Image: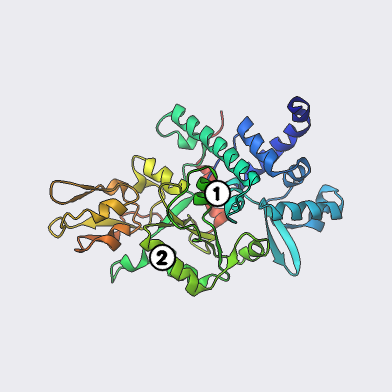
Amino acid sequence: MDEKKEPMTQPVYERLGEALKMRGGAVPVLHCREFYALMEELFTPDEAGLASKMPTRLVSAAELAKETGGDPKVTEELLESMANKGLLASYERDGVLVYELLKLLPGIFEAQFSTGEVSERSKRIAHLFQGYMNLMMQLRDKMGPGAAAGIGPAFPFSRVLTVEQEIPAGVEIQPYDKISQYIENAPYIALGTCFCRHFGELLGNPCEKTKQNCMGLSSAVKQWVARGFGKQISKEEALDILKRSEKEGLVHCTSNIGEELEFICNCCTCHCGILGSLRDADSPSMAATSSFIASLDEEVCSGCGDCVDICPMDALKMGDDVVALDSNRCIGCGRCVSTCPTGALKLELREGAPVPPRDQDALNAAMMSSMQPET
């Protein structure tokens, strides 16, 4: 049965893969059995065919039907079906819905798990995503150190936002380092389930941390909420969620752009893909860091070890009497400073801290240019 199906559907999903590859993102598109199995679960052949023809700009159903020569009603039905399944983003522009194909990650992955749904289909999708991610990790392991750029972008997609109250007084804070400013400027805020922790739960690996703490911040999430992928919250509620997340030891992560952010995740090292990959790196401070870094005054350190337990990157370890800090592993999240009872740990500006790309287009360009050409 599969042998009869493959010749009809495989070219459609190959074209879909190329369309997703053009969108960039944190996870590369690899043409392989695992990828096609995932795509066939998410997209019907008709949906895949239409999605592969979508331009990289926003497009309405009428415009897409005209460009592709399709029936306007059928085109609209397919677009709506994909948007309701979290495969496309939709926005209202001058009273008309416009659509864009989401990246594989972030985008499609998060949408599948942001509702907190537990069903046979959600479990199946989780296992298919896991199979694809396992394949990428196996390829990285085979290729050895420095291989990430060979099958994915070397330029970081994500960055860390520091616990704001731990930034020293008198230090000039750039707008892109101030999490409260992003909340204040957000035109619309939506709250959803932490997709990484829910993903783990579907795979039989639950996390003890809370799950209702991932946020979308742009006007784009209005349609997201309307389609049942989250709920609208106030700015005050968003700030409260950030404070509670900090108390749980979660790390604020977002996309590596400086202007309007699409999301803020509150991440744990045990389930979050961003923090997990950083923790496995030899020098996490070279990747998705904040503009700050921890400093340690050994004379003030009491050796209590509270900071060792909460550091997500294992940058702090107990010595003979006091804590030892490995600056190469510090991502500047500020969790240790919040925990330190003596004030031995403080944040300072990171020397040569990179300025994030201005917007999503600039980030995509930086990531694509950091990819090694396929051989």
Q: Viewer-proximal residue, 121 or 327?
A: 121
Residue 77: quarter of image: bottom right
Query: Is residue 319 shown above or below 171?
Result: above
Give amino acid for label 1: Ala
The answer to which of marks 2 and 1 sits earlier in the sequence is 2
Question: Callout 1: 10 Å neighbours few (<14), some, many (20+)?
Answer: few
User: In the image, residue 282 lies at what x, y percent?
Assistant: 34, 39
Rendered image: mark on residue 268: none
Is residue 10 in view? yes
Q: Viewer-proximal residue, 34 or 347?
A: 34
| Residue that appears at 57% across and 55% down | 116
Name the residue that disc number 1 marks.
Answer: 365
User: In the image, residue 325 lies at what x, y percent?
Assistant: 23, 49
Name the residue that disc number 2 marks.
Answer: 244
Give amino acid for label 2: Arg
User: In the image, residue 257 lies at what x, y percent?
Assistant: 49, 57
Question: Callout 2: 10 Å neighbours few (<14), some, many (20+)?
Answer: some
Q: Viewer-proximal residue, 196 or 285?
A: 196
Q: In the image, 87: left or right of 68?
A: left
Q: SS of the residue at dot 1? A: helix
Quarter of the picture holding the C terminus: top right
Query: Is residue 120 shown above or below 267?
Result: above
